[in-house]
Image: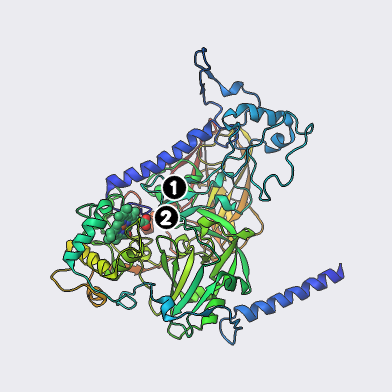
Amino acid sequence: MSILDPNSDAKNKLKIASLVEAEEAFLAKARTNANSVYFSQHHIEPVKPVKGEPARSVDPLQRPQNRRHFLASVAVLASSSVAGRAIAQTTPSLEGKAPPGAVWRSVPEDATKIPGTAIGEDGGYGTRSQFETEVRWRFGTKTPLSSWSMTPLEHGVGIITPSGLHFERDHGGIATIDPATHKVFVHGMVKQPKKFSMLDVKRFPSISRILFIECSGNGLTEWSKPTLKTVQGTHGLVSTSEWTGVPLSTILNEVGVKSGAKWLLVEGGDAAVMTRSIPIDKAMKDCFLAYGQNGEAIRPEQGYPLRLIAPGYEGNTHIKWVRRIELSDKPFMTREETSKYTDLLPSGKAVQFSLIMDAKSVITRPSGEMTLSGPGFYEITGLAWSGRGRIKRVDVSTDGGRTWKPADLQGPILPICQTRFRFPWVWDGKEAILQSRCVDETGYVQPTLGQLIEVRGLNGPIGSIYHLNAIQSWKVDTEGRVSNVHYY
Amino acid sequence: MFTTTKLFLQVTACGALFALNTYAVGADPVRYGFGEPASAHDLQDFVSSLPDGRDLPSGSGTISRGKQVYDEKCASCHGQKMEGGVGDRLLGGRGTLVNDDPKKAPVKTVESYWPYATTLFDYIKRAMPFYTPGSLTNDEVYSVTGYILSEANILKGDEPITAESLARVAMPNRDGFILDHRPDHFKPADKHPRLR
């Protein structure tokens, strides 16, 4: 399944509709979960009839300690046993069933009156709290073997994406590869073709870098009209990890590059045997083969045991499950750099090798489908990133782009990495349009959607599909409800 | 305090030197000698292709054999007429790429969009059939590649399909691609933004 289906309009509608459906299914659950930022106080939840009793509805407003707003106080929850008990009461569906990545433990009335879980009970590998429920959700493609899942950016704090929430995209399922037998072959225009075991790879001096990876299809549903409702849906194909591995320059030096070599093909060992051509200058400059992610081995869905990191390039070039590198004088023109990942313009010409991800930012809180609890103070926060270097500044507008004020940037501000921004805001209860606009160190200013469409055109419902980096608008209505809109 | 700073400086200096030694691309970088030579035998099963036909494996196919392969192993997902199903539509769409209509999508297929026939061999060889990738012989892949191209009215005749013949195929959209010209230069944003 390709990200988009260029085949017919009917099908396009169908596919986007199923993406909308996937998000709606997720939201339906989230709205009834007191622990979710999307928890809706106004939601009336039907209660299953108990034997002999007629069905009745319970207004969650009546429940003790309901938490619904995006500024819900986690501190209160953590420090108060009353709140803890309330959660246990208000989320009966969670009882006995832990969310993915967690283990269910019974919740005592008062955690100060009974010993907690013994160290070692987790077998030596920790899990997240049973009260934390955010997950990646997947687009309902016809086959889950070529699909993608999105990072819940609205829950994120700081700049690192938890490894288990890093967005995924693959074209043939998640390969299972034993590192003990895995080999990487490097050949083509080299003086000495070589093969490296994982042990060999790890013997080389390593580097670590905190970098974002973004799929160039991020936001493809948003070209012609606001389509998905949450920031997870509109922007969730970007994540940030610390990656550790060996520079490609080290490996290439080891085999000796023949003069005239200009491109290298990097190939995955998954069922799609995914391939992309990378310019050799880029490979020598800063690409590396990563075996580490956020302090441990790279996750299977991220390419275990070895993934290419091409800093600032579109996600598809970051080949996972790397098994082979071939050097050549010309690009290989693989399917993913011709049929896909090319940007077709209204002129009929398509831009090829549009590899770099341009600067982009988005407000993650408050964002689509959240509700402000009333006029007063809110911290607007979000993320900004650029494939061309550091983020220099982020401006925030609460009036739809008429006026802008600089946001605070939270350090570290690293090149080709997500940077967190914050902006204090007192909401007066009137309608507002929230936007963020970033500038990177090259001076590039994130465009409005209007500016972007001006140069890229809108040839079909999903335009040129890839590389949508326009300013995102969130509308706050007088009830405090936040929604995805186009405002430019 | 002082000693800590000094130590820190020394370590940083070492780090910098080491970095230079290790990552310098030009003059005289370190060679570690890890890994083993890869033999021709090690590399024989890998397939990749360049548009001029280099790197494609030996073998040949025919369009009629390709029809058999397609009906048996591809049609279930790509449709009897290559109109698409679980897998992408493979035919049609010529003349739809020039398009300024936001309501109408251009139809991008092997026939209308792909610039090189070699890519078709390469992709089928590595990734198709979707549930049993890598199961076709080179001759079968040459054949089915030829069949798709003939159904697309790109290839005609009974000439055997080989690395050389695929390199000679003139795909309809061969000249449809331009190089990246970003960063874009935008006109000023609309002074009167509004809901759209």
In this rendering, the answer to whether B122 lies above or below A153 is: below
Q: Which residue is mark 2?
A: A451
Q: Chain of mark 1?
A: A
Q: Residue at x 31, y 50 (%)?
A: B86
Residue B175, quarter of the rendered image: bottom left
Front residue of A479 and A154: A154
- Quarter placement of the C terminus of chain B: top left
Residue A393, quarter of the rendered image: bottom right
Front residue of A443 and B174: B174
Residue B21 appears left or right of B62: right
Q: Chain of mark 2?
A: A
Which disc number belongs to residue A488?
1
Q: Residue at x 32, y 58 (%)?
A: B129
Query: For the residue labelled by badge 1, is the local secondary structure a helix, a strand or a loop?
Result: loop
In this rendering, the answer to whether B38 lies above or below A399 is: below
**What's the CA distance linking mark 2 and mark 1?**
9 Å
Q: Earlier in the sequence, mark 2 or mark 1?
A: 2
- Quarter placement of the N terminus of chain B: bottom right
Residue B146 in picture, x, y percent from top left: 21, 67
Front residue of A3 and A146: A146
Residue A201, quarter of the rendered image: bottom right
